[in-house]
Amino acid sequence: AEARGLVSEILEAGMQPDVATYSSLLALVSRLAEVDGPAGMEESRVLMEELEAGGVEANEVVFNAAIDCCAKAATAGASPSLCLSRGRRLLAGMARWGLRPSPSTYHSLVDLAT
């Protein structure tokens, strides 16, 4: 809810969040996912939806941060199978955006699968 609140504040200030904003917010949410996996997964999901709805062009950094949230959430109380499924959907999303996964992307996915 904190990350979404920051997006709302940015919008209320008359500014538009960009890809750097979402990358930073997802890094913040990744920390949340380390302590509250389910909350981190939900925040990550909502941020990615807002990014897409806002017409922000995602990049590899954004997707890697979202996948990293899934990996961290799986170790902090979120359903591992749900986290893996979400990670796979994000990987498919990268392909839809024409983005190539990096070694970091695959590292996070391997973390999810183990």
Image (cartoon, rainbow, N blue to C red):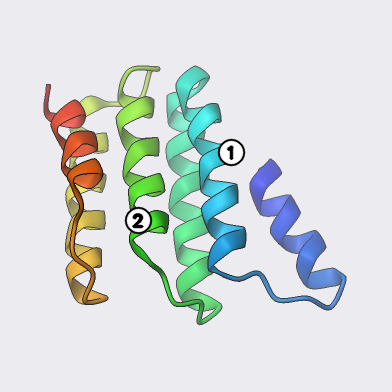
> Which secondary structure lies at badge 2?
helix
Image quadrant holding the N terminus, namely top right
Check disc 1 and give the amino acid type. Answer: Leu
Image-based side of 99 in relation to 41, left or right = left
Residue placed most toward the observer, 77 or 48: 48
Label 1 Cα crowd, 10 Å radius (few <14 / some 14-19 / many 20+): some
Give residue 47's position: percent from left, percent from top: 52, 56
Q: Which of pointers 1 and 2 lies earlier in the amino acid sequence?
A: 1
Q: Residue furthest right?
A: 13
Give residue 86's position: percent from left, percent from top: 26, 46
Image-based side of 29 in relation to 84, left or right = right
Q: Residue at x 66, y 69 (%)?
A: 17
Label 2 Cα crowd, 10 Å radius (few <14 / some 14-19 / many 20+): many
User: What whole-number distance in Å separates the C-alpha atoms at marks 1 and 2?
Assistant: 14 Å
Residue placed most toward the observer, 75 or 17: 17
Image quadrant holding the C terminus, namely top left
For the residues labelled 1 and 2, say whether their Cβ atoms are less than 8 Å apart: no
Residue 6: which disc? none
* Number of marks drawn: 2
Residue 63: which disc? 2
Q: Which residue lies furthest to the bottom in this view?
A: 55
Q: Residue furthest front?
A: 103
Residue 28: which disc? 1
Give residue 9's position: percent from left, percent from top: 81, 60
